[in-house]
Image (spheres, rainbow, N blue to C red):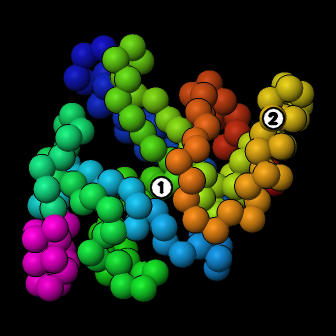
Amino acid sequence: MDRRQRSKKHDWLVSKTQSILKHYTCPESCNASCCKTHIIDFRRKEYEKILKNVDKESARILKSNAVKSELEGCYKAIVGHCPLLIDTKCRIYDNRPEACRNFPFVIFPDDDIGFGLTLLLCPMSVNIIQDYAQWYKSVNSTMYSELNNLYKHYKNIDKNNDFCIEMKESNLDSFIEFLERK
């Protein structure tokens, strides 16, 4: 897959995650553990745009806490507790990086298909899993049972869990249609 195709696929996955996420919000029980435990990777242009669009104090904090990213195509990263988090609120919410806008979805590089998509477990994603299970009910009863059991097991989760499920590209459009009819 060439660079243009990879970029197009990445943008397609971002648009699909955003189409799904518009149906959900973080529940009150969420303690922003995504901002406390996950690596936030920035692309160069995104990092520079954020620095230009935030107050001086947020820019200073970001600059002093960002390190060279290990992820291909990314420029800077914040590892662990995000320094821009105040209590459970993001200082730069309207300008937050793509990784934060897509969370709990993670778009990751894959040599064979360009990019893959996973859903990390957190208080919001268990609601997505519940709906994904309901969508699967008419498609595949085994997957429905597995996802429904996963939902039941984690429905009271109060922080992120490293467990994740793969979201198949071939299901995304149909799942989004299901959400829109709901």
Location of the C terminus (image quadrant): bottom right
Q: Decide: is 111 above or below 155.
A: above
Nearer mark to the viewer, of 2 and 1 = 2
Percent x, y of residue 76: 16, 53
Asked if residue 42 lies in the magenta stretch, the reply is no
Q: Decide: is 175 above or below 24.
A: above
Disc 2 marks a residue whose amino acid type is Glu
For disc 2, the marked residue is: 146
Disc 1 marks a residue whose amino acid type is Phe
146 to the left or right of 34: right
Asked if residue 54 lies in the magenta stretch, the reply is yes
For disc 1, the marked residue is: 103
- What's the distance in space between the residues labelled 2 and 1, CA to CA? 22 Å
Counting residues from the N terminus, which is met first, the one under dot 2 or under dot 1? 1
Q: At x 46% / y 81%, what residue is drawn?
A: 88
Span highlighted in magenta in the image: 50-65
